[in-house]
Image (cartoon, rainbow, N blue to C red):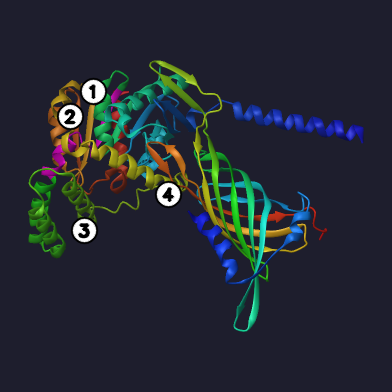
C-alpha cells in the first residue's frame, strides 16, 4: 500500500509539473501563429489575437470598425490568404470585444486609443523582437483611429492601408446627403427598388442641413439599408463568401460585445466624433507608403472620403483602389482581389 | 426591495392562511440544515464552468391553502447561501474568471417537491483571469504576473428545482443568474449565466 501511495504521489507530482511547464511556456511556432495576449495600458486590458505566418516577423496590425466592433470581425477568406504569408494581429480596442478594465468616460479619447495602438506595437516588439516590421490597416472607424495613431507616431510602420476609412468623420454628414441624392436618382432612373430610393430622397430632404448627431445616426442607418438594396439589385457582390465561419461568434459573448459596442460608441459619439473630428489638414504629415481601398458602392463611408485622403496624404508612394463590386466591406465581397492587393503592397514595402 | 416584499408577504400572509411554524428545525444540527450543491455554471455558447456552494436553512414556514376543496401545503424557506465558481470560454480564453458570492435564498416547495426559488446575493466578487498580458508604461513593457481584474459582482438568480426528501442527493436545480460587474470598462457590465446542478444533504439516509 505504501509503495502504491509513493507511486501515486510521483504521478501526481509529474502531472502538476507538466501542467505548470505547459502553462508557463512562451513557446510559439512563428510559421503558424495562434496566440492570444492582452495589452495592459492606462487602466485597460485589450485583447490581441496574433495569427498566421510570422516567419519573416512582418505583421499586419488591424484596427476594427465601429467604434465598438471587434478585432476578429475581419477574419474570413481575404485575411486567411494574408495570414498564409504574414502575421496578422486582430486587436480588440479599448472598450470593445473582449477588452476590459476600469476607467471613466472622461478618460476615453481618440488620442488615448491611438496610444493604445502604439502600446500594442511595443508589446509585439517585446514578444517577437525589435526587428519585427509592422503595417497598419484600419477599416471604417479603424481608418479614423489609424490616422490618429500615425499622426502620433508613424516611425514603427512600414505602410498604412485604409479600407473604407473615415479620416474626416465630421464630413460624413454632407457626404451622406450628396451620395444618397446621387445614388438614389441613378437607381430610380434605372428602375431599381424605386420605393426605397424615394424614401432615401425623402430622408435627405427632412434632415437638418447642419450636422447633428440624431440626423447623422439616422443617415448612417439608412446607409446600411442602402447597401443591402444595392446588393439585392446586383451591384454589390454577396459578402457571405468572404466572411469567416463561426469562430467570431464563439469568441465573443454576444451580450458583452453588444454592451461594449453601445458604451464605447456612445462615449465617442457624445464627444463629437461625427461632428468635430477631421484629420484632413494633418494628412500631409503622414509620409509612409499608403494604400487606400474603397468600395464603389460604399454608402457608409462614401468613396469621396478615400479620394480626399488619397489627395491629401503626404506619402510619395500612395495608391487608391476602387473595388467595383463592393460596398462597405471589400474584404468580404471581393476577398481574392482584396488579399492580392494587400499582399502586393506589403511585399513591396516590407 | 424584492426581499422586503417577500418578508412582508411572509409576515402578513399569516392572517389569511392557515399556517404553522415548524419548530422541529430548531433542534436540528448544522449539517441537518445545510445542503451542499455542485453544478454547471455558464452560458453554454460562450463560457462553461462549474460552481459549488452551500445553503443553510434559516427559517422554514409551512403554509396550507384551501383550493377547490383540497388543501395544498407549500413550504417556504429562507436560506443563507454561498457559491464559488469558475467559468471559461475555450475558444480564446479571453472570458475566464472565478466568482464568489453570498446572500439569501427564498424557496417555495410544493407537496410534490417542485421548487421555485429566488437568490439575492449582494456580496459578490468576480475575478477575471487573462492569458499572457503585458503592461506598457511609457517605453517600458513588463509581463504581468497572474493577470486579471476584480469586479464587485452581486447576483440575482431565479430558478426552479426538485426536492428529494430524505435522500443524500437531496435535490436538483436550474436557474438563470444576472450578475453585473461593476466598473467594467467605463460602466457596469450585465452578465447572464445558467446554473444547473444537484444538492446534497449528507445527514440524510444513504440512497
Q: Secondary structure at mark 2?
A: loop
Structural distance between the alpha carbons of marks 4 and 1 = 33 Å
Badge 3 is on which residue?
A229
Task: Say few, some or many: other residues with alpha carbon within 10 Å of mark 3 (under 14 / 14 to 19 / 20 or more).
Answer: some
Most foreground residue, B89 or B59: B59
Chain letter for mark 2:
A
Question: Is residue A165 found inside the magenta-colored segment of the image?
Answer: yes
Would you say the residues marked 2 and 3 are in contact, meaning their CB atoms lie under 8 Å apart? no
Structural distance between the alpha carbons of marks 1 and 3 = 37 Å
Badge 1 is on which residue?
A151
Q: In the rendered structure, which disc, 1 or 3, sits on the residue that comes first in sequence?
A: 1
Structural distance between the alpha carbons of marks 4 and 3 = 27 Å
In the image, are marks 4 and 2 on the same chain? yes
Badge 2 is on which residue?
A279
Most foreground residue, A82 or B8: B8
In percent of width and height, residue B59 lies at: 66, 56
Amino acid at each position: 500500500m505504501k509503495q502504491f501511495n509513493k507511486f501515486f504521489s510521483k504521478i501526481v507530482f509529474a502531472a502538476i509539473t507538466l501542467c505548470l511547464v505547459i502553462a508557463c511556456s512562451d513557446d510559439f511556432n512563428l510559421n503558424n501563429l495562434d496566440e492570444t495576449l492582452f495589452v495592459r495600458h492606462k487602466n485597460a486590458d485589450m485583447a490581441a489575437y496574433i495569427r498566421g505566418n510570422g516567419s519573416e516577423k512582418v505583421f499586419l496590425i488591424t484596427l476594427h470598425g465601429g467604434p465598438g466592433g471587434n478585432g476578429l470581425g475581419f477574419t474570413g477568406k481575404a485575411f486567411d490568404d494574408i495570414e498564409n504569408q504574414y502575421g496578422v494581429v486582430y486587436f480588440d480596442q479599448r472598450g470593445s470585444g473582449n477588452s476590459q478594465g476600469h476607467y471613466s468616460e472622461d478618460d476615453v479619447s481618440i488620442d488615448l486609443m491611438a496610444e493604445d495602438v502604439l502600446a500594442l506595437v511595443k508589446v509585439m516588439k517585446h514578444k517577437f523582437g525589435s526587428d519585427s516590421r509592422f503595417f497598419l490597416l484600419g477599416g471604417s472607424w479603424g481608418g479614423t483611429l489609424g490616422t490618429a495613431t500615425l499622426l502620433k507616431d508613424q516611425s514603427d510602420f512600414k505602410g498604412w492601408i485604409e479600407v473604407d476609412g473615415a479620416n474626416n468623420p465630421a464630413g460624413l454628414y454632407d457626404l451622406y446627403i450628396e451620395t444618397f441624392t446621387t445614388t438614389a436618382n441613378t437607381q430610380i432612373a434605372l428602375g431599381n427598388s424605386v420605393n426605397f430610393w424615394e424614401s432615401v430622397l425623402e430622408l435627405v430632404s427632412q434632415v437638418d442641413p447642419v450636422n447633428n448627431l440624431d440626423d447623422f445616426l439616422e443617415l448612417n442607418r439608412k446607409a446600411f439599408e442602402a447597401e443591402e438594396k444595392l446588393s439585392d439589385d446586383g451591384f454589390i457582390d454577396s459578402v457571405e463568401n468572404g466572411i469567416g465561419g463561426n469562430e467570431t461568434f464563439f469568441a465573443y459573448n454576444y451580450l458583452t460585445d453588444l454592451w461594449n459596442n453601445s458604451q464605447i460608441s456612445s462615449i465617442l459619439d457624445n464627444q463629437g466624433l461625427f461632428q468635430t473630428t477631421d484629420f484632413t489638414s494633418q494628412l500631409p504629415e503622414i509620409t509612409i507608403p499608403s494604400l487606400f481601398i474603397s468600395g464603389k458602392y460604399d454608402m457608409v463611408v462614401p468613396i469621396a472620403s478615400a479620394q480626399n485622403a488619397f489627395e491629401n496624404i503626404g506619402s510619395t508612394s500612395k495608391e487608391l483602389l476602387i473595388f467595383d463590386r463592393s460596398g462597405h466591406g471589400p474584404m468580404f465581397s471581393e476577398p481574392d482581389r482584396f488579399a492580392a492587393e494587400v499582399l502586393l503592397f506589403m511585399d513591396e514595402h516590407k | 426591495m424584492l426581499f422586503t416584499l417577500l418578508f412582508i408577504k411572509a409576515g402578513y400572509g399569516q392572517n389569511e392562511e392557515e399556517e404553522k411554524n415548524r419548530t422541529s428545525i430548531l433542534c436540528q444540527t448544522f449539517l441537518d440544515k445545510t445542503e451542499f450543491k455542485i453544478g454547471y455554471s455558464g452560458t453554454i455558447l460562450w463560457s462553461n464552468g462549474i460552481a459549488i456552494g452551500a445553503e443553510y436553512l434559516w427559517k422554514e414556514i409551512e403554509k396550507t391553502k384551501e383550493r377547490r376543496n383540497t388543501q395544498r401545503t407549500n413550504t417556504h424557506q429562507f436560506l443563507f447561501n454561498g457559491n464559488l465558481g469558475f467559468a471559461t470560454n475555450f475558444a480564446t480564453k479571453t472570458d475566464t474568471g472565478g466568482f464568489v458570492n453570498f446572500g439569501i435564498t427564498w424557496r417555495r416547495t410544493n407537496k410534490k417537491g417542485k421548487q421555485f426559488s429566488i437568490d439575492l446575493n449582494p456580496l459578490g466578487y468576480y475575478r477575471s483571469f487573462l492569458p499572457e498580458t503585458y503592461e506598457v508604461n511609457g517605453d517600458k513593457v513588463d509581463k504581468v504576473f497572474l493577470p486579471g481584474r476584480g469586479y464587485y459582482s452581486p447576483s440575482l438568480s431565479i430558478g426552479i428545482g426538485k426536492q428529494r426528501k430524505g435522500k443524500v442527493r437531496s435535490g436538483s436545480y436550474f436557474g438563470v443568474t444576472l450578475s453585473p460587474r461593476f466598473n467594467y470598462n467605463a460602466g457596469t457590465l450585465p452578465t447572464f449565466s445558467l446554473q444547473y446542478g444537484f444538492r446534497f444533504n449528507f445527514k440524510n439516509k444513504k440512497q
